[in-house]
Amino acid sequence: MKRSLLILIGALALGAVIFACSFFAARHTTVLCCAQPADDLNWLRLEFHLGDADMARIREMHEGYLPKCAELCVKIATAKRELDLLVGNGTNLTAEAQAKVKEIADLRAQCQSQMLEHFVAVSQAMPTEQGKRYLAEMKKLTLGDHEQMEESMSDHPGHEHQH
């Protein structure tokens, strides 16, 4: 009985210590996060270990790029709404709807090109090795979804989708 009581007290003490450590670690993390202002580029600084001078150059590029990006996003969204209206509940794809599909594709290609140009410029503002790694990641994000779709639709051996 005495041994069971000691085990129970020991387990409760261990649980209290684990709880206290978790509580203080979470509190410390929260204080650190709240002390740093919200920064949409902070991930870049942390991931690529960039200094203040690198971040200042990159931030300037980023802020210069955002209006171009927003403008293209608006154009793409508008064209998609127009396509939705043209297609409606119809059973045929009109020439006008086909032209709108091409317009959307052209806008998306323009968007990808601008993004890649921006990512190349940012990578050149970084130390060489970090810039190479950054550009490789951004190319995957920019082109990856399209490449996966193209591969899934191709008829090379091993794919279920055959033309």
Image (tube, rainbow, N blue to C red):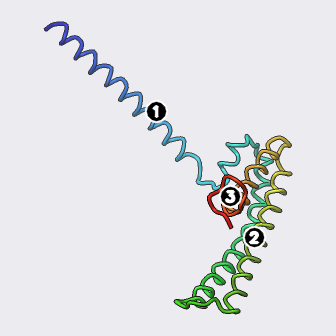
At a point 39% along the width and 34% down the height, the residue shown is: 23
x and y, in percent, of residue 129 in the image: 83, 40
Residue at which label 3 appears = 148
Question: Badge 3: few (under 14), some or many (20 or more) residues near its Cα, within 10 Å?
Answer: few
Nearer the camera: disc 2 or disc 3: 3
User: In the shown orientation, is residue 5 left or right of residue 113?
Assistant: left
At a point 63% along the width and 79% down the height, the residue shown is: 77
Residue at which label 2 appears = 111
Going from the N terminus, do you reach mark 1 or mark 2 first? Answer: 1
Quarter of the figure with the C terminus: bottom right
Q: CA distance from mark 1 to mark 2?
A: 43 Å
Residue furthest to the top: 2
Q: CA distance from mark 1 to mark 3?
A: 41 Å
**Disc on res. 84:** none
Q: Nearer the viewer, residue 127 or 32?
A: 127
Residue 102 drawn above or below residue 36: below
x and y, in percent, of residue 152 in the image: 66, 60
Q: Nearer the viewer, residue 55 or 161?
A: 161
In which quadrant of the rendered view does residue 79 lie? bottom right
Going from the N terminus, do you reach mark 2 or mark 3 first? Answer: 2
Whether the residues at callouts 1 and 3 have beta carbons within 8 Å, the answer is no
Element type at marker 1? helix
What kind of residue is marked 1? Ala
What kind of residue is marked 2? Cys
x and y, in percent, of residue 138 in the image: 74, 54
What kind of residue is marked 3? Gln
Residue 71 drawn above or below residue 131: below
Residue at which label 1 appears = 25
